[in-house]
Amino acid sequence: MTFNRRRFIQSAAAAAGAAQLGFPALARAQGEPIRLGLLTVKTGALASGGIDMERGLTIFLKE
């Protein structure tokens, strides 16, 4: 069996459709909270950028 462009598009469409059928089960709310992490620089020459990133994330999470 040759794998030409038409066959590839059909396979990709079938895979995308199958993935969509299983997705709603994963999209439901889970019992555990989502944990986020942020790695920034807080000392040295780049500290001002790292502190600003941390403040921005804090503001984002409050909203």
Image: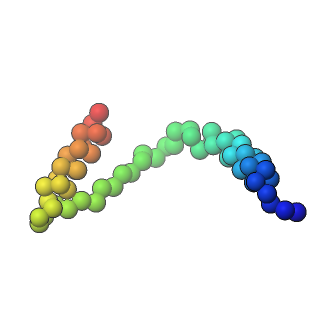
Q: Nearer the viewer, residue 62 or 17?
A: 17
Residue 46 appears anywhere in the view: yes
Q: Nearer the viewer, residue 4 or 62?
A: 4
Residue 18 appears anywhere in the view: no
Where is residue 46? Give x, y as percent. 15, 61
Where is residue 55? Give x, y as percent. 20, 46
The quadrant holding residue 3 is: bottom right
Q: Is residue 6 above or below residue 60?
A: below
Where is residue 58? Give x, y as percent. 24, 43
Q: Residue at x 11, y 64 (%)?
A: 45
Screen quadrant of the C terminus: top left
Q: Residue at x 27, y 45 (%)?
A: 57
Where is residue 44? Give x, y as percent. 11, 66
Tell which residue pokes out farthest to the bottom in this image: 44
The number of numbered discs placed on residues in the rendered structure image is 0
Tell which residue pokes out farthest to the top in this image: 63
Q: Residue at x 63, y 43 (%)?
A: 23
Screen quadrant of the N terminus: bottom right
Left or right: where 10 falls relative to 32: right
Q: Is residue 51 above or below residue 61?
A: below
